[in-house]
């Protein structure tokens, strides 16, 4: 009897966990079939002469990740006071600024996965945050290494555990000593003077932990925050001026990305979904962009997963297969219309393929329908382009196709993101009810358990013959039938084929 109850109890717990940890959106493994980039949509009666991924926009890129960097630390009063060089770049420099929204859980390891894969990690990753295994999912770092790019990393050793044997050179720092907010950053900065003079790398990643440690110690309003932001501002200035000084020697410009993995709450912690924890700044700084003029516009709100797609396009790499991110169009707006349409088509094709592999009725998805419509319009535009048409008709059609792609990509990304974040509440409720019912069964089977004459051997028949027990079972069956017949999708048990179950 006790063994049966424990098995049912385990079933209830398992059902609850299945609802709480939904299945992630996944594509083929990265070592599966070779992913060749799709050609341009073929125009009627003609063949496109462009079938490869466009050349990289940037020769080198530096990613500077400042742990727990809130958006108001850069765009608010603290940014104006303590980060004057960064503020000048945002308001008058050659940059594009965004507010990146991070999905919970807002802890470091899941956020690094989101930044590099473009996918949305789940709460199960919180358990692995302190002992991160190697990341086997398709990601930007693996794509860059496969393409022969030399990657150098300094900072939080979570990256070293996630991407073993990916870095040509690295120096990891531990985040265990929260009281240290000085040496943990000095151990990163001490490499800069030497590495910035060299030309033997393609991607440099820096992860600073000091600001996060200050937040844990004394919160976002600590007097230590200001000096740390000033320190970060000076590092941004050093990197930016060094990249600019080298651009005269090369044809392609260089890119500096400044971002945070997550923010911090008003108490200095993180992991939840408060605005301070999920909103982080995302800055793209490069001489390839037009210099800002006029009044400063508020930073646009984007998703943190958009960084992986944008960097992949910028570095001439394939987009990660599991990415649900959208290309940040301002980063590529300096390119020709044909190149912009090509970038958006690559992004839309990857999202539509991911949708096909995870949604049986993908053809009915509005985003998929919009993408197919945009592809047809794109083919018409290419036909005019290849025919040498340079009239205003070509320009207007190009703008129309651009808008169609943006709408399709937005809807596709939204559909895929909802699948990741859609918890099976019904499975969670049913699991909880099963656990409670087993506890009730114990109470019914041991009516004298709390009395002085409690017996060890309890007969099985009284609880199983209890009218209350059978009424509860009947009630649960009725609720099950009502919910599964009225909901748009069946629960886990009803979705299983009876033939396969048997």
Image (cartoon, grey):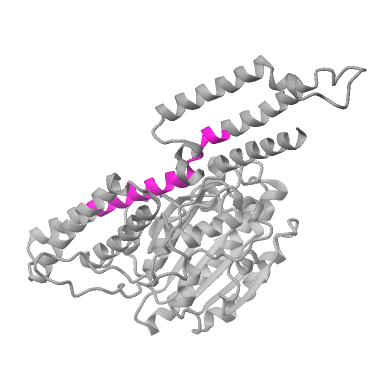
Which residue does the image show at 67% across and 46% down from the upper left?
Answer: 219
Q: Position of residue 159 (x, y in %)?
A: 60, 66
Q: Report whether residue 61 is seen.
A: no
Can residue 436 be seen at all in this image of the molecule? Answer: yes
Residue range corresponding to the magenta coloring: 404-428
Residue 184 falls in image quadrant = bottom right
Q: Left or right of 190: which side holds 255?
A: left
Q: Is residue 401 above or below residue 249?
A: above
Q: Would you say 443 lies left or right of 100 here?
A: right
Q: Is residue 28 left or right of residue 273?
A: left
Residue 201, given in percent of the width and then of the height, sits at 50, 80
Residue at 57%, 35% in the rendered image: 428
Residue situated in front as seen by the camera: 180 or 404: 404
Picture layout, residue 270 above or below residue 335: above
Q: Is residue 201 magenta?
A: no
Q: Quadrant of residue 55?
A: bottom left
What secondary structure predominates along the stretch shown in magenta? helix
The quarter in which the N terminus is drawn is top right
Q: Is residue 414 magenta?
A: yes
Q: Residue at x 59, y 47 (%)?
A: 123
Numbered circles on residues, count: 0
């Amino acid at each position: 009897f006790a063994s049966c109850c424990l098995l049912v109890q385990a079933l209830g717990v398992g059902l609850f966990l299945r609802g709480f940890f939904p299945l992630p959106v996944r594509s083929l493994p990265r070592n599966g079939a070779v992913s060749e980039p799709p050609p341009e949509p073929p125009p009627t009666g003609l063949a496109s002469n462009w079938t490869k991924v466009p050349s990289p926009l940037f020769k080198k890129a530096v990613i500077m990740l400042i742990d727990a960097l809130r958006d108001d630390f850069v765009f608010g009063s603290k940014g104006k006071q303590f980060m004057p060089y960064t503020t000048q770049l945002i308001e008058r420099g050659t940059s594009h600024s965004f507010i990146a929204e991070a999905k919970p859980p807002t802890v470091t390891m899941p956020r690094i996965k989101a930044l590099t894969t473009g996918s949305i990690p789940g709460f199960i990753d919180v358990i692995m945050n302190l002992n991160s295994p190697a990341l086997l999912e398709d990601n930007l770092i693996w794509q860059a290494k496969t393409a022969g790019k030399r990657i150098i990393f300094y900072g939080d050793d979570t990256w070293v555990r996630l991407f073993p044997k990916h870095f040509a050179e690295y120096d990891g720092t531990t985040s265990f000593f929260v009281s240290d907010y000085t040496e943990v950053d000095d151990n990163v900065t001490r490499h800069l003077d030497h590495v910035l003079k060299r030309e033997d790398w393609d991607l440099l990643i820096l992860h600073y932990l000091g600001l996060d440690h200050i937040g844990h110690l004394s919160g976002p309003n600590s007097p230590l925050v200001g000096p740390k932001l000033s320190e970060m501002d000076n590092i941004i200035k050093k990197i930016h001026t060094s990249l600019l000084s080298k651009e005269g020697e090369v044809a392609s410009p260089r890119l500096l990305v400044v971002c945070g993995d997550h923010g911090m709450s008003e108490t200095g912690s993180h992991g939840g979904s408060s605005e301070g924890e999920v909103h982080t700044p995302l800055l793209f700084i490069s001489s390839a962009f037009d210099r800002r003029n006029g009044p400063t516009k508020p930073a646009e709100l984007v998703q943190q997963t958009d960084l992986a797609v944008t960097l992949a396009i910028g570095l001439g790499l394939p987009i990660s297969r599991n990415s649900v991110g959208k290309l940040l169009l301002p980063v590529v707006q300096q390119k020709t219309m044909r190149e912009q349409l090509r970038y958006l088509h690559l992004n839309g094709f990857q999202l539509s393929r991911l949708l096909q592999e995870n949604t049986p009725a993908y053809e009915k998805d509005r985003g998929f329908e919009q993408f197919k419509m945009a592809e047809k319009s794109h083919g018409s535009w290419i036909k005019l382009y290849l025919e040498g048409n340079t009239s205003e008709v070509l320009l207007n059609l190009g703008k129309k196709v651009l808008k169609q792609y943006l709408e399709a990509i937005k809807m596709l990304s939204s559909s895929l993101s909802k699948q990741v974040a859609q918890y099976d509440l019904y499975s969670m409720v049913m699991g909880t009810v099963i656990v409670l019912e087993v506890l009730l069964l114990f109470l019914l089977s041991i009516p004298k358990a709390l009395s002085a004459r409690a017996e060890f051997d309890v007969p099985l028949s009284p609880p199983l013959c209890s009218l209350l027990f059978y009424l509860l079972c009947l009630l649960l069956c009725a609720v099950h039938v009502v919910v599964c017949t009225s909901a748009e999708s069946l629960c886990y048990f009803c979705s299983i084929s009876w033939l396969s179950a048997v």
